[in-house]
Amino acid sequence: MCLAVPARVATLLENQWIEIEVGGIHTRISTALIDEVKVGDYVIVHAGFAITRLDVLEAEKSLALFDEIAAHLEKRIDALHPRLP
């Protein structure tokens, strides 16, 4: 299963490459599939490519939901692999 996630553009690099930031993690991805990306934009990232730009409010809503899910899973360590009694 693959998951496309919103990421903030942190740095413009050369030759259709950018550095993105998600949850404090920075990585390099390609912008070969979209045009005119700027620092501060949000993009949807899938398999190392920015596939579309995303409205800031929509990106922030999505990221807040991911944070909520992560917080819930931290409370329930067995949420993904429940232990049998």
Image (spheres, rainbow, N blue to C red):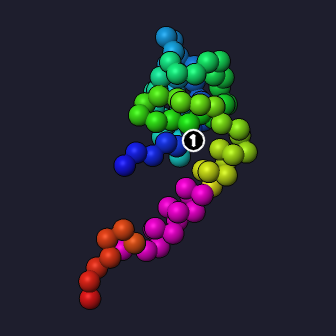
Examine the rendered structure and indicate whether residue 62 appears above or below residue 15: below
Where residue 78 appears, as percent x and y from the top left, is 36, 74
Seen in the image, is 75 located left or right of residue 67? Answer: left
Q: What kind of secondary structure does the magenta stretch mostly adopt? A: helix
- Residue under numbered circle 1: 6
Seen in the image, is 64 located left or right of residue 16? Answer: right
Where residue 75 appears, as percent x and y from the top left, is 47, 73
Q: Nearer the viewer, residue 34 or 75?
A: 34
**Which quadrant holds residue 27?**
top left
Report if residue 77 is visible in the image: no
Which residue lies most toward the bottom here?
Answer: 85
Q: Is residue 37 a member of the stretch shown in magenta?
A: no
The C terminus appears in which quarter of the rendering? bottom left
**Residue in the picture at 41% in, 34% down:** 47
| Circle 1 residues within 10 Å: few <14, some 14–19, many ≥20 | many
Report if residue 51 is visible in the image: yes
Q: Which residues are magenta?
A: 65-78
**Residue in the picture at 52% in, 43% down:** 5
Amino acid type of the residue that numbered disc 1 sits on in the rendered structure: Pro
Which residue lies most toward the top here?
Answer: 15
Examine the rendered structure and indicate whether residue 56 appears above or below residue 27: below
**Residue in the picture at 28% in, 79% down:** 83
